Structure formats: structure tokens, C-alpha cells
Image (cartoon, coloured by chain):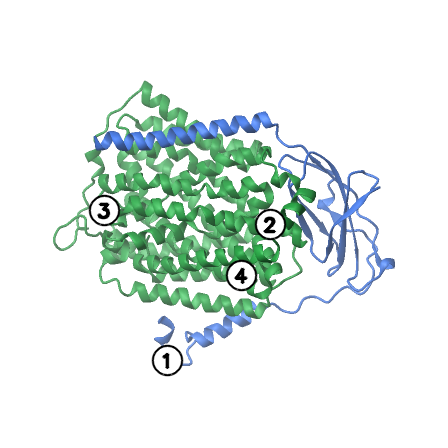
Amino acid sequence: MVNEAILDPGIAAILLVAFSVLWVFLGWWWGRAAKDVEDYMLAGRKVGLALGTATAMATWVTSNTTMVAPQLALQMGIWGMVGYSLGSVGLILFAPMARRIRNLMPTGFTSGDFIRLRYGNFAWRVFLLISLFYAMGWLVSLGMAGGILIQALSGIEYWIGMTVILGICVLYTLLGGLRAVIGTDFIQTLIIIIGIVVLGFMVIDKVGFDDVHARLTTERPELLNLLMPAAIMFLFNNLLFGVGEIFHSNVWWSRAFAFRPGVGFKAYLIAGLFWAPIPIAAGFVALAAPEIGINVPRPDMVGPLVAANLLGTAGAILVFIIVFSALASSLDSLLAATSDLIVEDIYRKHLRPSATSPMLRRAASAVILILGGITWILCILNLATLASLLHFTGAFVASTIWPIAAGLFWKRTNKKGATWAMILGTVAGVLAYRYIGFYVAALFGASVSMVIVLLTTLLRPGTFDWKDLKEAAPEGLEDDDGDPNASSSIRTSTSPSA
Amino acid sequence: MPFDSGPAGRSRHPAVAALLLLTFLIPSARPSAAQHSPSAPPVLNGGTDQQTVKEGYYTLRWEHEQPGLYFVVEESRSPEFVDTEVVYEGPDLATFLSGEPNGELFYRVRARPPTGGDADWSPWSDTHQVIVAHHALSRAFTFLGVGAFVFLATVVLIIAGGRTIRE
């Protein structure tokens, strides 16, 4: 599709090798500092505010933020990038929930634990299907972003770049523990913030607001139209999609369990506030595309293409480093958290209740490798653009918002209501995606789910004792002092976790 | 660091690994440009005549059996291409367009060797029509209202729920 490349393939390869070695080295270096399983899996459940904020923010600044935000700006104009920045609302709303989760489940491990204890086995299995589908969608979008980035900048074929980046991140995840994930997240956060600010200023300096505005007014007027219908429909859809992603995903729950008491609220709040401007800065870059007259073969390539064409080799290198950092910070967390979910909720709870610690450790490593393999296959198929793939998962995750939020704060929300809310919400979201567009899938999923939770809670109120969420650690998983809060064999096994 | 743990010369050494990766990554030389003029026209958007879009954006794709050609894509508001505008010229095989208001647009593409002249152009492809028909504003605002309601209800649930629990 693309014949022109900006970055010399040799330079791209050197950058790829250099940063691959750096992340793998840091993953190994910090991972080796973990002396026991508590350190390894949950960093002793004592992660402080600075590192907690950095890891929350870095994980949420994904390659999607740096590549899909420009895509949405090019597709939907002003509201596209503003709508994407509303993804920060998910982090901000999760702040009080993180505090509640930490208080209700001091020994909790996964988001699946909450659903199982709160709503029973059937709801738990429905939730697992939704959560795993979402995790795969996110993983595939990250892998695709890596391949697209390399291709856009250097002309190296999509499948080669995707394979290398995915392989490095799987290796890096296998080597590291939570200390490694948080440590690298901190560095990656600094790189991303500084890089995007520098990039934004460079673009403004080279092109200027007036020229960009004049060109868009003439050639692409709808991008400046605040009444563009699809963009208006997209606004709250993206907000609810982000809320659904964060409320349900084990990536965020595992951090809530790992933060020191009292840290979760502040960490998620600050991370959300600092994250909000990033998609706007990244999105603005795309609006400069018509003014500088470059060809955009597919919309998810626009960010790297504009930066590279406008700023030359320096811009291409800068974008490469930013996106590679964003990719690594998200992939390690997602692989690890999804592995936790599969090992804890499927392997141990469904298949091998009596699994020993070494068995669980092997299972965790195998799960990470299998996840990497499945992701690679789906990425090779290259079925959709990043935004459409990502927002298809929105149809699923938005249906979990109300079952989770109401389940955390309302005793009367019942099992059947929560289960049907997830099922029918997902069906509604998928239908909306199919018959209207990707920009309303999460909106339909969340709306239908909310109505069902409200009706069933009002008409058939249940009762729930919050103490039932304080599940004792399984036998044999306490530490030497018999403290169930300390660690577990699951944690031992799920090597790199976040 | 992990790569330092082995003896020098083993494949796990970082310098060796980097060289192997570099060899793997650097693509082989691209096929040389076509030398003769294409006689057949390119195929635009798989040969489909028409598409309708409700978001104001779409992608045009074209292909040609002969590799390495140079293309020009024209846009017009009329099917006869009375007034035309070049939306792309170069070697790429697709272009993404966005921000279009309601209306009908017509596209066609032709190809020539990169070093060729005006006499080397292929015939124009079949015309591809794009009909831009945005969603109705009433529908958009209905969805906006529903989204705002669900969002505010979620905020109230979390804030009020948190206060009730603390009390």
C-alpha cells in the first residue's frame, strides 16, 4: 500500500535493536531485585504514589493513544481528538473505585475474583469471556500498531516489524516482575510526555495554526465542524468505552491490589488529569497532514507519517521512540495481567484446583507465550484499522460498567441482573457496531446494561454481605507467618505482573 | 544484563544478536521500476462502481498488474470529470480522504512508468462514485443525550455510593 519511506531501514533496525535491548535489560535488571513472591507479583502491595501514578499513566498511554488519536482527528476532526482525550475520565472515575476495591478485597488478586464472589459462577464465566476477548483485541491492536509504525517510517514490511516488536515485548514480560514493569513504566512515561510535547511544538513551529486552519477550512471543512454528526455520536461513546476498559480489566484491578492503602485514589486521579492533554497534542499532528500535502494511505499511519515528513529523520526517530515506549509500557502490563487472569481464573479455578506452585509457574510462562502466539496470528491477518478493531471491543467492555460499579457500591444489585446486563449489553453493542458504526458500539452496550441493572435492582433487590468479598487465601498460599495478605503460589507463578 | 552472562562468541551475545536482527530487518532491494508503458488501466476500489459513507471519510485503493508504476488520482463533482482536482500522484496504492460534506464525488486513476512522459499514461480506470450522506443531526444529538445521561448516572452512582459507604 505504501511505497515511500522516510526513515532509512538501517536506522530503523538500529533503533529497534537498541530499544529492544534496553527494555529487555531493564526488565531483567529490575526483575532480579525481587527477592520473594510478594515482591515479584504485587511489589509487596506497597507501591507508592509517584510510581503508582507513573505506572497507571504509562499503561494508559498506549500505542493506541499515540496512533489512534491522530487517526480519529483525521477522521472526525476536532471532536475526534477531544473525544479520545475523554478516555481520561475512566482513570479519574476509577480513583474512588480503587480505594473501595482495596478496602473490600485486601487479599484479592484479579477482577475475576470480584465477579465470582459478588455475582456467582455463571456471571463470572460471562465476564471472563468478555474480558479475554477485550484483552485479545487490545493485544492485537498493540501488535498491529508496532508493525504499522515500522512500515510507515522505514518501509520495512508490516509483518517483520510486528513480529520483532511483539517478540521483544513477550520476552521482556517473561523476564520482569511487577518491580520491572513499574520501573520501566516510569521511564517510559517521561519519554512519552517529553516526546509528545517536543513533537507538538515542532509541528506548530513548522506549520502554524493559521495555515492548518486555512487548509482544513478549504479542503476538509467537516473536520472543523463542531456539528459533524458522526463526531457528536462518538463523544460519549469513547468516554464510555474508556470507562468500560478500566472498570473491568485486570490490568487496573491488579494495580489497585498492589498499591499501598490510600495511594490508589490519588494515583488514578493524578494519572487521569495528566493523561487528558496527550491525545489532543498527538491528534493535532494529524490535522497538519492536508497542509503539508502528504499522502495518507491508511488513517492509522497519519501520526508517524506527518511527523516524519515534516520533521525529517529527527521527527521519524522521535515518533519511533515515543510509540515504542508506549507499546512496551502497555504490552508488558497487558500480557502479565491477562496471564494472571487466565492462570488464576481458568487454569487453577476451573482445570487444576490442586496445582502446585511449580505447575502454576510453568502455566503462567506458557500462557504468556501462547498469548503472544495468538496475537501474532491475528496481527498477520491485518483485518481492520486500529480504531475499528479497538472500538469493536468497546461493544463488550462497556456492558460491564454498571454491573461492576453497582456491584461495588450497592448491596441490592443481584446476580441475574448483572449477568443479563453483561450479555444483552454486549449484544446491543455488537448490533450497533454492525448496523450504525464503531462510534456508537460502547454507547449502546453501556446504555442497555445500565437499564437492566437499574430495573433488576429496583424490581428484584438482592442482599449481599460485603464480608463475602474478603476471601481467605487458599490453603498453602499464605507466607511463612501464615499471613494470607502476603503472597500466594499464584503470584509466584505469574511471573511478570501488573 | 542477560546477554552478558554467556561466553563471547555464543549466539546470545548482544552484538551477534543485533547483527542477526539487522540482517533480518533490512529489506531487500525493491523491484526495479517498470520499463514499458502500461496498456491496461488500474483497477480502482476493486472495480466497484459506488459506495455510500455516513462519516465523511473513506479510503480509495487501486492496483495494477504491473509493479512499480506511478499513479495519478483525479476527483470531480461531475461524472464527466468537467472540473477535476488531483488528489494524489505518486507510487502509493491508496489514499485516505476525510472531512467531506454531503454530496457526490467521482474518482478515476491512471498509471505510467515513473520515468515516463505524457505518452506513457495508461487509459483511465472505471469511475468510482462516493456518496457522502452524513447521519441526521437529530439522531446524533439523541445519541449524545443518551451518552450524557449514562455518564452522569455512572458518576452519581460512584460518588453517592462512596458517600453512603463512608457514612
- The colour of chain B is blue
> Which secondary structure, mark 1?
loop
Q: Residue furthest right?
A: B119
Q: Residue furthest bottom?
A: B8
Which of the two discs, 2 and 1, sits closer to the camera?
A: 2
Instruction: Give the image quarter of residue A171.
Output: bottom left
Q: Which residue is mark 2?
A: A209
- Label 4 near label 1: C-beta < 8 Å? no
Residue nearest the observer in this picture, B97 or A33: B97
Chain under numbered label 4:
A
> Which secondary structure, mark 2?
helix
Chain under numbered label 1:
B
Question: In green, which chain?
Answer: A
| Label disc, if present, on residue A161 of the rendered structure | 4
Q: Which residue is mark 3?
A: A261
The amino acid beneath tag 3 is Pro
- Label 1 near label 2: C-beta < 8 Å? no
Q: Quadrant location of the N terminus of chain A?
A: bottom right
Whether A8 is drawn above or below A116: the answer is: below
Which of the two discs, 4 and 3, sits closer to the camera?
A: 3
